[in-house]
Image: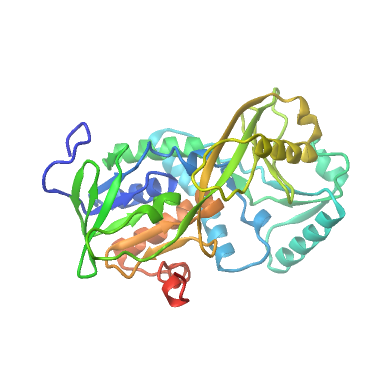
């Protein structure tokens, strides 16, 4: 590969990663640390799709309705973040703003109280860290909370990261490690022969490789095989989420605030990220009046004092959702073809554990029970087409 990103004739790599979001970047970094020759191919710019549009919430307890394998996967990944933050700072000198202030989950209506009670009961039985606060106790921690709040759950372990700072640090780490990066490069097809990966054809040329990781998010299903060697049929659809960013001066919030209808993510510089919508609109990336109105209504329900905060930014992104709403992880029926996609609303949260599992599978031939549960081959087993 030349300095300007042109693929030379007979280009080879130990592994090609398709997709330059947080998942692809974290996998590329880990593989390169193990001395593999890694090429990362991104259709746009690194980290500028779903990963950039996210809120950076690391909150499996606040979002879970039950303890299952997905919940365990999410909690394990959340718990890896202090190590990730420390390592990235050592590698790059960049702080990813891992905020460990915790999360407050608000019951604002009678129906909310019932949901909060159920969540508190099962998580308490499971031995998880959660406490129930009175309205007065919660408002003592966060005075901006609506006066009519009924009860609040405190999840000290549910934290947040500045996802854009995380992306910057990962990009820097990959560059320092020597990962070969191709941006604004389309994957035209994947080359297979006798059920094995042989290479990838891109808009800049062909790369021969025995292994490919598909981490292309909402665009995963657009990638096909060359000639008559079919790829597994894994359907990943885009689900649009809109976001609003407010500015508070001085900083108005210290904790991540949740309700059953929305959330507020405070940043250290006084910004507050408010979200979000869930819309099945294909690849229409527009920010809409209705979407923004819904988010602002949810915002003011949680913290009415934010009515005077200026709106400084709005945006939308595409969450990648599989048919069963669960991530798609691990090797497919095609030898050398790995999937790391379908993370839906949890791409930032699940990035560390995804990288660990995929890298273990590639470098150590280790198949974690998680990879068995979330395998791309599960769709064939249940007859999903």
Viewer-closest of 257 and 75:
257
- The answer to whether 373 appears left or right of 293 in the picture is left
Q: Is residue 111 visible?
A: yes
Residue 301 vertical placement versus 24 (above, below): above
- The answer to whether 181 appears left or right of 278 in the picture is left
Question: Which residue shows up at 35% across the image and 58% down it?
Answer: 359
Question: Which residue shows up at 80% across the image and 30% down it?
Answer: 305
Give percent across and percent down for residue 341: 44, 56
Residue 351 vertical placement versus 117 (above, below): above
Question: Which residue shows up at 39% across the image and 35% down it?
Answer: 92
Viewer-closest of 276 and 142:
276
Viewer-closest of 115 and 165:
115
Give percent across and percent down for residue 157: 64, 52
Q: Quadrant of residue 118?
A: bottom right
Give percent across and percent down for residue 339: 38, 60
Q: Residue furthest left?
A: 9
Classify the position of the C terminus by image quarter: bottom left
Q: Is residue 265 visible?
A: no
């Amino acid at each position: 590969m030349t300095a300007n990103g042109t693929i030379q004739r007979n280009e080879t790599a130990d592994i090609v990663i398709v997709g330059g979001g947080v998942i692809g970047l974290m996998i590329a970094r880990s593989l390169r640390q193990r001395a593999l020759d890694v090429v990362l191919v991104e259709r746009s710019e690194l980290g500028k799709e779903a990963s950039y549009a996210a809120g950076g919430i690391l909150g499996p307890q606040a979002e879970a309705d039950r303890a299952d394998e997905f919940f365990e996967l999410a909690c394990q990944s959340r718990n890896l973040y202090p190590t990730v933050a420390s390592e990235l700072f050592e590698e790059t000198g960049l702080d990813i703003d891992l905020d460990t202030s915790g999360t407050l989950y608000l019951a604002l209506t009678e129906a909310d109280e019932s949901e909060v009670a159920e969540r508190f009961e099962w998580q308490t039985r499971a031995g998880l860290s959660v406490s129930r606060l009175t309205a007065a106790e919660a408002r003592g921690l966060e005075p901006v909370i609506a006066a009519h709040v009924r009860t609040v759950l405190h999840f000290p372990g549910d934290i947040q990261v500045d996802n854009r700072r995380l992306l910057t640090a990962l990009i820097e780490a990959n560059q320092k490690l020597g990962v070969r990066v191709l941006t604004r490069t389309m994957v035209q097809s994947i080359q297979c022969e006798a059920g094995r990966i042989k290479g990838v054809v891109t808009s800049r040329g062909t790369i021969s490789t025995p292994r490919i990781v598909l981490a292309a998010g909402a665009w995963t299903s657009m990638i096909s095989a060359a000639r008559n060697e079919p790829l597994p049929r894994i359907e990943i659809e885009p689900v649009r989420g809109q976001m609003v960013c407010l500015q508070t001066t001085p900083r108005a919030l210290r904790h991540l605030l949740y309700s059953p209808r929305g959330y507020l993510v405070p940043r250290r510089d006084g910004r507050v990220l408010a979200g979000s919508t869930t819309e099945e609109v294909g690849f229409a990336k527009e920010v809409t009046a209705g979407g923004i109105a819904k988010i602002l209504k949810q915002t003011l329900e949680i913290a009415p004092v934010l009515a005077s905060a200026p709106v400084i930014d709005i945006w939308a992104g595409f969450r990648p959702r599989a048919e069963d709403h669960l991530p798609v992880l691990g090797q497919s029926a095609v030898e050398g073809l790995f999937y790391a996609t379908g993370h839906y609303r949890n791409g930032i949260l699940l990035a560390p554990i995804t990288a660990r599992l995929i890298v273990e599978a590639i470098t150590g031939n280790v198949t974690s029970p998680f990879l068995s549960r979330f395998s791309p081959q599960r769709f064939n087993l249940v007859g999903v087409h």
